[in-house]
């Protein structure tokens, strides 16, 4: 109990920094664009119900409409065919929404090549420097891509060949999903896979491997540059949508600055 109270006091006095890793939700929040033959997610829409007026004199409130996988969001195992029959987002145990962060910085590689994909050698080099990836932790892929987050076109970075955004190789996805006890994988891009991942073998390996292993994804993260390589704690809080495949969520990090 003392440790919990110490944490609370640290948040109050500022020695534990609380970092918001969440992109704001609005009509221009970037969304995943699939080929036209597939179904599409809805952009975020806000509909005013009343604003201290004749529709409701003492209150302001809204309806909203959007897809489960809009903005900073959580991927549950049942999101992918490899996780069919596994937990929906409402069934994910709350203790599995919180865990230590391992942050790998690939901003230089991504600056040089927007299609850069993390590989097993990168992960093993990180482990040689920092130790094994943490049990029940989040592996955060820092790329600097969130700097594009207020410009949907730059964020998508698409041309006639499709989007060009960073991700992980099939081998790296398999290693993290099957050879570690991570909770999941966090990225700054619109989804957990690289922009060109439809052409990988298997297609969309991060979705396939992580969801199939009962692990999770969190996407469109911001402020990853404020996290140390190790030592932060990530809290990812999706809405418990019954039968839902995911949810927009508030992701925060706790970093001890004492």
Image (cartoon, grey):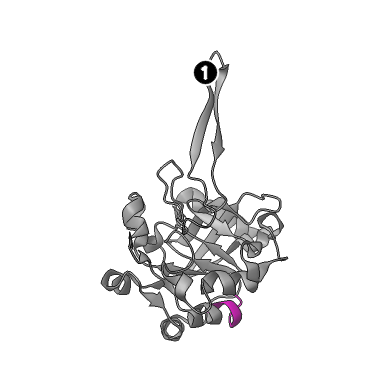
- Give how far across and how far down residue 78 sits, in percent: 66, 63
Q: Quadrant of residue 214?
A: bottom right
Q: Which element carries disc 1, helix, strand or loop?
A: strand
Indicate the quadrant containing the C terminus: top left, top right, bottom left or bottom right: bottom left
| 119 sits left or right of 161 in the view | right
| The magenta stretch spans residue 30 | no
Q: Residue furthest front?
A: 37
Identify which residue, 117 or 6, lies in the foreground.
117
Q: Is residue 181 magenta?
A: yes
In this rendering, the count of numbered labels is: 1
Task: State which quarter of the image contains the N terminus.
Answer: bottom right
Residue 231, given in percent of the width and then of the height, sits at: 48, 69
Q: Which residues are magenta?
A: 176-182
Q: Is residue 6 left or right of residue 193?
A: right
Residue found at x 43% / y 81%: 119
Asked if residue 150 is positioned above or below residue 82 in the image, the reply reads above
Asked if residue 230 shows in the view, the reply is no
Going 50% across and 35% down the picture, which residue do you hit? 46
Residue 184 position within the rendered picture, expressed as x and y whole percent measured from the top left: 56, 69
Q: Which residue is label 1 attached to?
A: 52
Q: Residue furthest top?
A: 54
Question: Is 47 drawn above or below residue 41 in the view shown?
Answer: above
| Residue 180 in the image, given as x and y percentages of width and height | 58, 80
- Examine the rendered structure and indicate whether residue 67 appears above or below residue 38: above
Query: Residue sitting at 42 percent across and 86 percent down?
Result: 121
């Amino acid at each position: 109990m003392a440790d919990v109270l110490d944490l609370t006091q640290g948040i109050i006095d500022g020695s534990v920094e609380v970092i918001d890793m969440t992109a704001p939700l609005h009509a221009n929040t970037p969304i995943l664009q699939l080929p036209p033959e597939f179904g599409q997610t809805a952009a975020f829409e806000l509909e005013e119900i009343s604003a201290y007026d004749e529709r409701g004199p003492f209150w302001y409130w809204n309806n909203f409409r959007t897809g489960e996988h809009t903005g900073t969001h959580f991927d549950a195992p049942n999101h992918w065919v490899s996780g069919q029959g596994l937990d929906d987002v409402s069934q994910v145990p709350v203790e599995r929404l919180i865990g230590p962060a391992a942050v790998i910085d690939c901003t230089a590689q991504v600056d040089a090549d927007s299609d850069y994909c993390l590989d097993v050698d990168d992960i093993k080099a990180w482990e040689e420097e920092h130790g094994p990836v943490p049990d029940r932790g989040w592996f955060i892929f820092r790329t600097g891509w969130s700097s594009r987050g207020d410009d949907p076109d730059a964020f998508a970075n698409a041309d006639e060949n499709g989007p060009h955004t960073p991700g992980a190789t099939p081998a790296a996805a398999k290693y993290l999903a099957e050879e570690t006890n991570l909770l999941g994988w966090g990225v700054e891009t619109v989804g957990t896979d690289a922009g060109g991942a439809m052409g990988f073998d298997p297609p969309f390996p991060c979705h396939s491997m992580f969801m199939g292993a009962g692990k999770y994804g969190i996407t469109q993260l911001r402020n990853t540059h404020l996290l140390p390589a190790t030592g932060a704690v990530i809290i990812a809080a999706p809405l418990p949508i019954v039968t839902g495949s995911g949810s927009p969520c508030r992701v925060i990090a706790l970093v001890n600055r004492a």
